[in-house]
Amino acid sequence: MSHSEKEAQFFNTIANRLGRSRMTSPPPQPVRGVPDFWKMYNLSSNERIDLFIKNWEMLGGVAKRFSSPEALCSYIAEVVQTFEAKRIIHEDHALFQSMYQDSSFNGVEMTIWRKQEESDLLSKAAHADIGISIADFAIAHTGTVVMTSAASKGRSLSLLPTIFMAVIRTENIKTRMGEALQDINKWNNGKMPAGVHFISGPSRSADIENDLTIGVHGPGIVHALILEEETKG
């Protein structure tokens, strides 16, 4: 019996057990993508922020709001002291430069993700206690942070450190996933980034005997740091 005959026999058996004739052509698909009402669904800025925080925290993440970069960096210093962090790796962004003048970070090894040997950066990220990067978007309806990779922020920033902190500008919190994807699709004439990562709370795995374990394949602690003042960089 040929492969095609075996395949036909397999699907005929399934159809018979379902008590119906086998379909040999695709069913009609009158609607593609999300329905129109969902495309029109939107929330105000405050509603988006509140819903994102609610869903992010329900997924096990920590969310904080800040009115200035100085307040945000002070909070990072508190986390460093709480967890006795010794190694930080962060995106190459002006927002994080104030950490180098803050005595709270004395004795902390600071690595900037920029033009260095990739193997060195990967090693630094793998051994970092905290990774910090600017999020491209956050999705209110799913409690998701969207991270794209670039020369100034490799994907390992959000994947390898023990703790990951995503800094989110309020104007980049979207209501729906589709809004973020549409914006990303417009970048560089439709050329997608090398990596687009969707982070919804800490890393989870239930591969072994269905026991849920946190932090196996990524950071076990994730912070969403919402900056209400526009940042430059």
Image: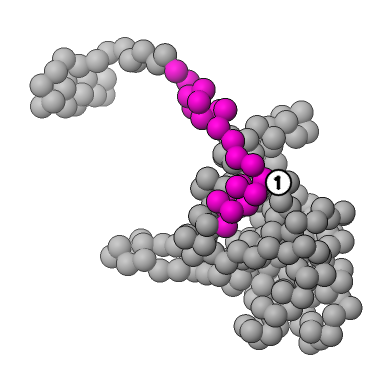
What amino acid is found at the position of numbered circle 1 in the picture? Asn
Residue that carries the numbered disc 1 in the rendered image: 172
**Image vertical order of residue 51 relative to residue 212, above or below:** above
Q: Which residues are magenta?
A: 31-53
Rendering coords of residue 185 (x, y %): 68, 32
57 and 97: which one is in front?
57
**Image vertical order of residue 209 relative to residue 22, above or below:** below
Q: Residue at x 60, y 40 (%)?
A: 43
Colour scheme employed for the rendering of this structure: one colour
As for residue 38 lying within the magenta part, the answer is yes
**Image vertical order of residue 45 relative to residue 115, above or below:** above
Give the quadrant of residue 134.
Answer: bottom right
As for residue 51 lying within the magenta part, the answer is yes
Q: Residue at x 40, y 69 (%)?
A: 213
Q: Mark yes or no: residue 28 visible.
A: yes
Rendering coords of residue 208 (x, y %): 33, 65
Rendering coords of residue 164 (x, y %): 63, 66
Rendering coords of residue 116 (x, y %): 82, 63
Q: Residue at x 24, y 15 (%)?
A: 23
